[in-house]
Image: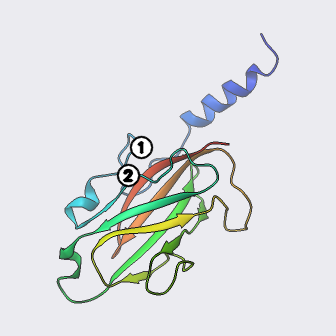
Amino acid sequence: MRRGSGVGVVLLLALALLPAPLLGQDPGGGGSTAGRARGFRLEPNYPNPLNPETRLRFFLGDELFASGKPVVVSIRIYNVLQQLVAVPTALNHPEGNSVPVDVLEYTTSGLKEAFWDGLDVSGRKVASGVYYQQLVVNGESTVRKMVVAK
């Protein structure tokens, strides 16, 4: 047996023991279709794999604004242990480009963007690996997988 081959075994065991997907995610790891039926969708982030930053795109449909009220949006990044890693910031939002997308109100439909710099909530660069972006719109959630590669 080669030296260091135990690391591969530990990694395989860790992958086998991963928790269930985040709420709203399909078991295959892609984005769910649940949000599309409710008037929103989470697009793939770009670039993916990312190093060290990425843009997160999501679409808010006209039907979400039929009541005349703003739509409340949150985006969160989680690791495979479902621990909160980061909250991206809005791009081209009326409140500014550095506003966290955390219970943030949107007043118009269309394609929206957020930015993640690859740092965790403590300001440290995240490790290479699989992460999940969760989009919550008016309390409804959808999730998409992304990869950090260094």
C-beta proximity under 8 Å, tags 2 and 1: yes
Indicate which disc residue 111 carries. Answer: none
Look at the numbered disc 2 and give the secondary structure of its residue.
loop
Which residue is located at x 23 percent, y 76 percent? 64
Residue 28, given in percent of the width and then of the height, sits at 38, 39
Q: Quadrant of the N terminus?
A: top right
Task: Give the alpha-carbon distance from disc 2 to disc 1, as whole Å.
Answer: 7 Å
Front-most of 82 and 88? 88
Query: Left or right: 70 with respect to 16?
Result: left
Query: Left or right: 47 with respect to 26?
Result: right
Q: Is residue 122 above or below residue 143?
A: below
Extreme-bottom residue of the structure: 68
**What amino acid is found at the position of numbered circle 1 in the picture?**
Gly
**What amino acid is found at the position of numbered circle 2 in the picture?**
Gln
Front-most of 94 and 140? 94
Which residue is located at x 48 percent, y 87 percent? 95
Category of crowding for the residue at label 2, using alpha-carbon neighbours closer than 10 angstroms: few (below 14), some (14–19), many (at least 20): many
Residue 84, given in percent of the width and then of the height, sits at 59, 63
Q: Quadrant of residue 98?
A: bottom right
Q: Quadrant of the C terminus?
A: top right
Residue 58, given in percent of the width and then of the height, sits at 36, 64
Q: Is residue 69 above or below residue 97?
A: below
Residue 41, given in percent of the width and then of the height, sits at 30, 61
Coloring scheme used: rainbow
Q: Is residue 116 above or below residue 8?
A: below
Query: Left or right: 18 with respect to 40?
Result: right
Q: Quadrant of residue 142?
A: bottom left
Question: What residue is pinned by disc 1?
Answer: 29
Question: What residue is pinned by disc 2?
Answer: 25
Which residue is located at x 62 percent, y 42 percent? 149
